[in-house]
Image (cartoon, rainbow, N blue to C red):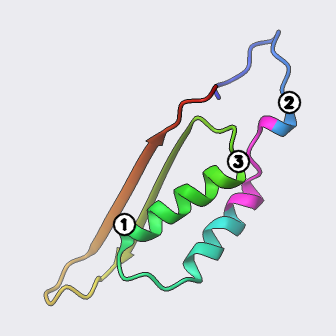
């Protein structure tokens, strides 16, 4: 969306509510998923469904001390999605 210039008018309907994003993320975390990939994909899809005007979403999830059978500090998965609008 970028930073508006002095001549642009910010339309609140085209913004993203950060409290709403927190609600989306919390809701997705309440559902059990075996893979971080499923979690980040579901978060991205829920954000797009809630805010259909967005053109881009980037979601990342990190799990500390994942149960991989050996000691590892963390595991992280990210998804980046660009949407065609119009």
Which comes before the other along the chain, label 2 or label 1? 2
Question: Which comes before the other along the chain, label 3 or label 1?
Answer: 1
The image quadrant of residue 22 is bottom right
CA gap, disc 2 to disc 3?
14 Å
| Image position of 52 with respect to 28: above or below | above
Image quadrant where one finds the C terminus:
top right
> For residue 8, what is the image quadrant?
top right
Q: Which residue is mark 1?
A: 37
Residues in magenta? 14-21
Q: Regarding mark 2 in the picture, which secondary structure is present there?
A: loop
- Magenta span contains residue 15: yes
Task: Please tell me which residue is depicted at 37% across the width and 82% down the height of the picture.
Answer: 34
The image position of residue 67, as x and y in percent, is 25, 88
Residue 83 is one of the magenta-drawn residues: no
Give the labeled residue for mark 3.
Answer: 51
Q: Which of pointers 2 and 3 indicates the residue nearer the eye?
A: 3
- The picture quadrant where one finds residue 85 is top right
Q: Secondary structure at mark 3?
A: loop
Reading the image, the residue beneath label 2 is 11
The Cα–Cα distance between marks 3 and 1, rounded to whole angstroms, is 21 Å
Question: Does the magenta stretch mainly form a helix, a strand or a loop?
Answer: helix
């Amino acid at each position: 969306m970028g930073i508006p210039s002095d001549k642009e008018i910010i339309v609140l309907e085209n913004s993203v509510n950060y409290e709403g994003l927190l609600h989306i993320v919390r809701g997705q975390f309440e559902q059990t998923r075996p893979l971080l990939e499923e979690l980040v994909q579901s978060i991205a899809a829920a954000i797009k469904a809630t805010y259909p005007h967005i053109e881009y979403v980037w979601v990342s999830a990190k799990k500390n001390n994942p149960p991989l059978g050996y000691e590892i500090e963390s595991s992280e998965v990210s998804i980046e999605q660009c949407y065609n609008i119009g």
